[in-house]
Amino acid sequence: MKAILTSSLGGSIKADGMRIPIPLMRENGQLDKIKAFWHENSKILLVSASPDDYGRNEGILNCLKESFHMSGLNFSLFMMCDARTEKLIERLSEMDVILLTGGHVPTQNTFLKRIRLKERLRKYEGLIIAWSAGSMNCAEIVYAGPESEGEAIDPNYQRWISGLGLTKVNILPHFERIKEDILDGFRLIEDITYADSIGHEILALNDGSYIVVDGVTETLYGEAYSIKDGCQKQICKNGESIILESKP
């Protein structure tokens, strides 16, 4: 099994409130890396982050179908697994590609547990492509940092939850977009993420940056920052890559 964990997959833009399909992101060789692992006429299963939001799910599915064609990624089957179609996960072994969408991290995490994706992936030999929340939920222990109003001040909100176990890396996506955000009166990065990083390392990725997990190495491509013990430092630049982990 191989995994490509991205901050953003790309594939669409908003115009007049509508999602318009465009090719997937090419920054730092992201699309080329996907193509290197791609099988002709792949069978694809898209796993939702919002299993009960059928309108959103249909929009994502239709947009990605067009985007994949535009990007030169051929497929013979492209299906959505959400609350209506949970039983599709039983066909996991038939799939060449599993897509894990972005969305609300805890909501997706609950759904992934419901369909027992972690257990099912143990024998999976295909390609996993994830973005945003999907990438975050691939961690062994997921950093589900507050993102919705009220979560930063909710004493019962769980910021660390069990994930799929594909990596030990905690990804914080869209860093260039969220680093000035305010949530519940707190600065998202300086007040919340820095505090949560005590005793933990969180890798903040800009859109266009991603991690490839191939079973032997974990390699980071593009601009990224390590946030650990309340401190931040850049660890990789656009056009460059670093090995995060290499197994003997």
Image: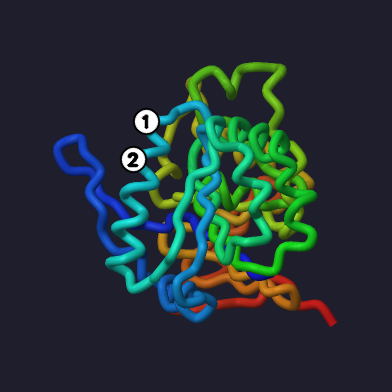
Q: Position of residue 78 (x, y in %)?
A: 45, 55
Q: Which numbered disc covers residue 55?
A: 1
Which residue occupies 37% across, 30% down? 55
Q: Position of residue 172 (x, y in %)?
A: 56, 49
Tell me the quadrant of the picture where the C terminus can be found: bottom right
* Residue, disc 2: 59
Q: Residue furthest right?
A: 248
Disc 1 to disc 2: CB gap under 8 Å: yes
Q: Position of residue 122 (x, y in %)?
A: 79, 59
Q: Residues within 10 Å of mark 2 (few under 14, many from 20)?
A: few
Q: Nearer the viewer, residue 129 or 117?
A: 117
Q: SS at mark 2? A: helix
Residue 163's place in the image compared with 78, above or below, is above
Q: Amino acid at mark 1?
A: Gly
State left or right for residue 152 relative to residue 237. right
Residue 169's place in the image compared with 240, above or below, is above
Q: Amino acid at mark 2?
A: Gly
Q: Quadrant of residue 181?
A: top left
Q: Quadrant of residue 106?
A: top right
Q: Residue furthest left?
A: 16
Which residue occupies 70% across, 53% down? 201
Q: Nearer the viewer, residue 151 or 92?
A: 92
Color theme of the render: rainbow
State left or right for residue 230 relative to residue 13. right
Q: Residues within 10 Å of mark 1 (few under 14, many from 20)?
A: few
